[in-house]
Image: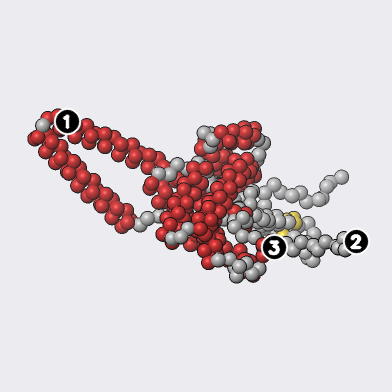
Amino acid sequence: MTDRTPRRPQAFRLDDPGVVLAEEGRAAPRGAIVVTPAPAMPEAAEDVPLPAPPPRSSFWGKLFWGGLGGLVSLGLGLAVSKLIEDLFTRADWLGYTGLAFAAALAAATLAILGREMFGLLRLNTLNRVREKAALAILKDDRALAAAVTQELLALTKSSPRLFRARTELGAHLDAIIDGADLVRLTERQLMAPLDAEATRLVSGAAKRVSVVTAVSPRAAVDLIFVLVTAIGLVRRLAELYGGRPGALGMLRLFRQVLAHLAVTGGMAAGDSLIQQVVGHGLAAKLSARLGEGVVNGLLTARLGLAAIEVTRPLPFAALPAPALRDVASGLISRGEDDEPKTPLRQPPAPGS
């Protein structure tokens, strides 16, 4: 008996009259090959946006600072050379002494420049790892995610607090197939203890600024203390997350932090907490100095949060980003918490 059922060809064209697309509510002709379109792939529910690139200096700015640095270096070199020649004209031992001091100065200068270059390269590495991690999550790229994980393991190998986390992460690398899941696992293992320490550092700096601003008698003292605290906070956060910034690195970090605050509008993020304080009537009970201390503490906390996002080598994907209330909860309290508790009146003793 001959089978008259038409067989599906191994390859066909959609413009073939014998091939029709399946449509709801429409019957296909007899003997035609019905093709069902593949369903569209759902978009990722949680997309991690790419981090903002660090601000880049213009060509003319680089040319200006390069020319100024070259002229200053030449001027200093000529001055040192003239000084050594004058010392030799007075006495040979003075000339050799000056030459030894000049050699020590040159060696120290080269060492400082090398350290500064190493710090800048380390910051560039952290920025590149953060961008690659965001791309790996968006594209679900397994190879890119594995490269990010290996780079982070290499960057954190000198941190003893992450020894257990590195061991557990290395044991699960081959079991993760998806690139996005691998980046999220890396973030949970390596960034969770660092985030907790960073939150503690920001909270402590905000409290110190608030107290010193409230008790200091001079505004100049407030300004100097806030500036020193902010510099120290950004440096400690950078070192915590694997950066080793020098003087130039600190300037670049502050530039990135301020640019991040300008883009995200972070300075206004404390308005909800300030309104909460005013709404509970606490501002009317506080002195002007104490109010300034609270505001300065909130701004320091917001600066610290921006520094965390700038210095952290991974974007916040699996772990929640610390909020302002997490690091500034000790600066203010509810109005009802500050009200004096009225003791309950004791019932009179019998027979009184």
- Image point (22%, 32%), residue name: 100
Density class for disc 2 (Cα within 10 Å; few <14, some 14-19, many ≥20) is: few
Q: Quadrant of the C terminus?
A: bottom right
Indicate the position of residue 155 as horizontal and vertical percent values.
51, 38
- Image point (17%, 30%), residue name: 96
Density class for disc 3 (Cα within 10 Å; few <14, some 14-19, many ≥20) is: few
Q: Quadrant of the N terminus?
A: top right
Question: Real-space Cα distance between discs 2 and 3?
Answer: 30 Å
Q: Is residue 4 above or below residue 85?
A: below
Question: Real-space Cα distance between discs 1 and 2?
Answer: 101 Å
- Image point (58%, 66%), residue name: 286
**Mark 1 vs mark 2: which is more N-terminal?**
1
Q: Is residue 288 left or right of residue 329?
A: left
Q: Quadrant of residue 270?
A: bottom right
Indicate the position of residue 25 as horizontal and vertical percent values.
79, 66
Q: Which residue is mark 3?
A: 340
Q: Which residue is mark 1?
A: 96
Q: Is residue 300 visible?
A: no
Circle 2 SS class: loop
Q: Is residue 90 left or right of residue 157?
A: left
Density class for disc 1 (Cα within 10 Å; few <14, some 14-19, many ≥20) is: some
Question: Real-space Cα distance between discs 1 and 3?
Answer: 76 Å
Q: Nearer the viewer, mark 1 or mark 3?
A: 3
Q: Is residue 105 above or below residue 259?
A: above
Q: Which residue is mark 2?
A: 350
**Mark 2 vs mark 3: which is more N-terminal?**
3
